[in-house]
Amino acid sequence: MEPFFFSSINTFVTDPLTHNFMRKALLMSSLVAAVCGFLSSYLTLKGWALMGDAVSHSVMPGVVVAYALGLPFSLGAFVFGVGSVALIGFVKQKSRVKEDTVIGLVFTAFFALGIVLISKIKSNIDLHSILFGSPLGISISDVRQTVIISLLVVILLSVFRKDLMLYCFDPRHAKTVGINVIFLHYLLLTCLSLAAVVGLQTVGIILVVAMLITPGATAYLLTDQFDIMTIISVCSAIISSIIGIYFSFWFDLETGGSIVLAQTFIFLLAFLFAPRYGILKFKRIFFINNNG
């Protein structure tokens, strides 16, 4: 007879897979996580955590407007995401206000506009699913949109990988060697807006920023090589999505929140135990030096 422990593990893993909605949620969440993890490496290297936050929150009014006009949610979200970035750039250039302040002003204004529009426009839009995602109830049309947008982001990031890496690491040097940094700037922002759109269904507007930041931050603690950092970022994002969905299924938890908590837990492990940059390594070194 199979030991109880192994039987329980087998039940924990296989039982959810008997449900079609769980298989679909696992596949879609893994795809979105891979895309966000891929982009997260560039955002971490560039230091665009706040920009990711701004874009993810600014897509909310786009969802409502798209619903009112009978258009796909992804189209409205993308337009408002790009629009928020353009507005941030315009205000930054035309005023003496610093970029982080402008970002805070724009994304809170867009987010508030979305909430007001939802309260005034009669619709069947579920505010909770927009804010926190609903991967277990994703529709077939949303699946198609997610796959297409995800492939587009991956292709763009792959084609311009080397130029984007240099731009994120040292934009001045990139400009010196003849790379069009303005094009790369808006290309990265476009990919960011698209990633926010695909993350909308999985973890929602509020938590998608974690999908765009945490995997890259985790990988940044574990390696100094960008290609390896990208692989670690993608893998940690996928693993955390799978763990989050399983725990949400078995313990009746909010799916988006469970995914983000799993990502945060993986980050904490890296923060503590990373071979080179973990804080416990520094404590060990300090102990050895003082007792050597």
Image (tube, rainbow, N blue to C red):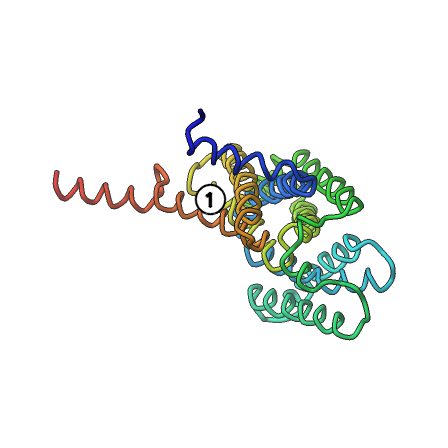
The residue that appears at 67% across and 48% down in the rendered structure is 136
Q: Position of residue 46 (x, y in %)?
A: 54, 48
* Quadrant of the image occupied by residue 238: top right
Left or right, 208 with respect to 290, comes to right
Left or right, 292 with respect to 152, comes to left
> The N terminus lies in which quarter of the figure?
top left
Identify the residue position indicated by label 1 in the image.
218
Residue type at mark 1? Thr
**In the foreground, 9 or 167:** 9
Mark 1 nearby-residue class (10 Å; few <14, some 14–19, many ≥20): many
Q: Residue 169, can we see it?
A: no
The residue that appears at 62% across and 38% down in the rendered structure is 163
Q: Secondary structure at mark 1?
A: helix
Q: Position of residue 273 (x, y in %)?
A: 35, 41
Q: Residue 109, can we see it?
A: yes
Q: Position of residue 43 (x, y in %)?
A: 56, 48
Q: How many marks?
A: 1
The residue that appears at 52% across and 51% down in the rendered structure is 251
The residue that appears at 48% across and 47% down in the rendered structure is 217
Q: Position of residue 93 (x, y in %)?
A: 65, 65
Left or right, 99 with respect to 91, comes to left
**Where 280 falls versus 253 (above or below)?**
above
**In the foreground, 114 or 285:** 114
